[in-house]
Amino acid sequence: MIIYFNGEYIKASTANISPTDRGLMLGDGVFETLFYNGTEIEGLRPHFDRLVKGATLFQIPFPLTISEFRSILLTIIEQNNLESTSTALRFTLTRGPSERGLVPPQSVSPTFLVTAQAYQRSSQLLQVGFSQYCFQQSSILSGVKHLGYQLPLLGRLEAEQRGLDDVLFFNEAGYLVSATAANVFILNRGVLITPPLSEGCLPGIMRGKIIQEMQQTSTPVRIDHITRQDVEEAAKIFLTNSLIGSVLATYKP
């Protein structure tokens, strides 16, 4: 695999990531995962905007323009001979190496890492259950994709142990937030509903696209609280993110 690493296109096996990189040591960084459908990169602008938002929040220098961002992604696709292949792209940005401790270095040398791997979307019906773990209420971190993915990881482990494809997180108020790495929509009594961002869910790119498209129809999405009972009684459940698109799921107690 060829990767983009700090301005160079190199073999992944030769990447020399510092053991003091704050992304590794502290999760001090942000990322975006994008889908290339074999023709174009879907949702390029909103992904770029969210990456800039995360970098700004964490005060990590991010000098790239959207044209440079796009060029890097297209080049990494080409370098891996994936021009006609659906592909998962990941752009990771960390603050880079520093001395130990939380205090950021005065001189920052950010780490840029971009990977590309063939990825095929699946239409397989997913089985989901309710997670035993509680999702914290919405915070400033809810709006960006940061490297602190401990709760989704715990959810994935839980799903595997229970023979599920994914689990759904609820917050302390008892309302649905998301799946481990996807937004959630339910169809209930003919109405498509998704949780508001105030519950703690990520403003997903695919979520936003679906809401926008449905607003142009006669059946717009309702953004509202969703309880466990609502999920249990839903006619359909959909998980959405940039990679999987929109996948149908069924609730398994």
Image (spheres, grey):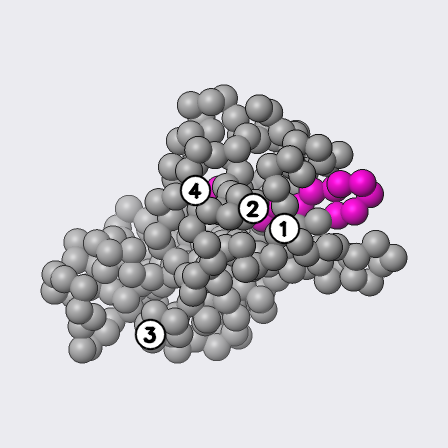
Chief secondary structure of the magenta portion: strand
Question: Callout 2: helix, strand or loop?
Answer: loop
Type of amino acid under label 1: His
Tell which tag, 4 or 3, sits nearer the viewer: 4
Q: Which residue is mark 3?
A: 59
Tell which tag, 1 or 3, sits nearer the viewer: 1
Q: CA distance from mark 2 to mark 4?
A: 10 Å
Type of amino acid under label 2: Tyr
Q: Which residue is mark 1?
A: 225
Q: Report the span colored magenta.
A: 180-192
Q: Residue, x 39% and y 58% (percent of image)?
A: 146
Question: Callout 1: helix, strand or loop?
Answer: loop
Q: Which residue is mark 2?
A: 175
Q: Position of residue 32 (x, y in %)?
A: 47, 58
Q: CA distance from mark 2 to mark 3?
A: 32 Å
Q: Which residue is mark 4?
A: 134
Vertical side of 5 occupied by 171: above or below: above
Tag count: 4
Type of amino acid under label 3: Gln
Between discs 2 and 4, the one toward the N terminus? 4
- Verify CB contact (< 8 Å) between mark 1 and mark 2: yes
Q: Residue, x 28% and y 66% (percent of image)?
A: 95
- Quadrant the C terminus occupies: top right
